[in-house]
Image (cartoon, rainbow, N blue to C red):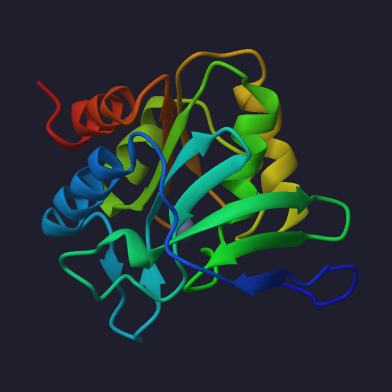
Amino acid sequence: MPDEGYIKFRCLHTPGPAPACAGLDALIRIRNRLHGLGLIGVLPDGIGFGNISLRTGDGFVISASATGHIALATAGHFSLVERCDIGSNTVRCRGPLAASSESMTHWAVYQAAPLIRSVIHVHDRRIWSRMLEKGDPCTEPEAAFGTPELARSVMRLARGRSSLILAMPGHEDGVMTGGETTDAALELLLGCFNPG
Ligand SMILES: [Zn+2]
């Protein structure tokens, strides 16, 4: 990808205690289940993939950056995202660790779809290629990882919806689901993981 015109992602992290909110225990449990299934983890080059979030009164909690290797995450592996700015590609977060570098994409869903309260993003070659073959909803092919373009593309697909499933052609193996609860988002994802 050419560097020209590419706005680098900026994370403004304020150290603080582990987030605490209703639904966080279920979020952690589902995150750990996805890790067990290999849908959240670490690539051979050491880069983590996959993240999960839950809307709160003042933003959303999301799995923190560089936690993909952890099998059993706890609240301390999550961060509260308080604000995002798509134009400057900036995320403001608070917690023991910085928020996932994919927080902007989750924020895009919450902005566009007030009914969606939880978002899951995983990497899986089988689900991703099957969705592309079927012509399921997809972000723009040129919208790459961590760019405002990807966030804008996700916003267009999520607008006004109460549930969401999409593939990211410009972000290899990237799939995202959203629902009114974390369980609903999980169910959508597992429906693709184990097609009946
Ligand atoms: Zn990803």
Total numbered labels: 0
Left or right: residue 159 versus residue 26 is right
Left or right: residue 51 versus residue 31 is right
Q: Position of residue 23 (x, y in %)?
A: 33, 35
Left or right: residue 109 versus residue 23 is right
Q: Quadrant of residue 175?
A: top left
Residue 101 appears in the rendering? no
Q: Position of residue 161 (x, y in %)?
A: 56, 14
Q: Quadrant of residue 32?
A: bottom left
Rendered-image quadrant of the N terminus: bottom right
Between residue 188 and residue 54, name the one nearer to us.
Answer: 54
Between residue 86 and residue 95, name the one nearer to us.
Answer: 95
Residue at 64 percent of width and 58 percent of height: 144
Between residue 194 and residue 69, name the one nearer to us.
Answer: 69
Please say if 129 is above or below 62: above
Please say if 104 is above or below 2: above
Between residue 61 and residue 48, name the one nearer to us.
Answer: 61
Q: Position of residue 62 (x, y in %)?
A: 46, 52
Q: Quadrant of residue 71?
A: bottom left
Please say if 3 is above or below 37: below
Rendered-image quadrant of the C terminus: top left
Residue at 60 percent of width and 61 percent of height: 145
Left or right: residue 150 versus residue 162 is right
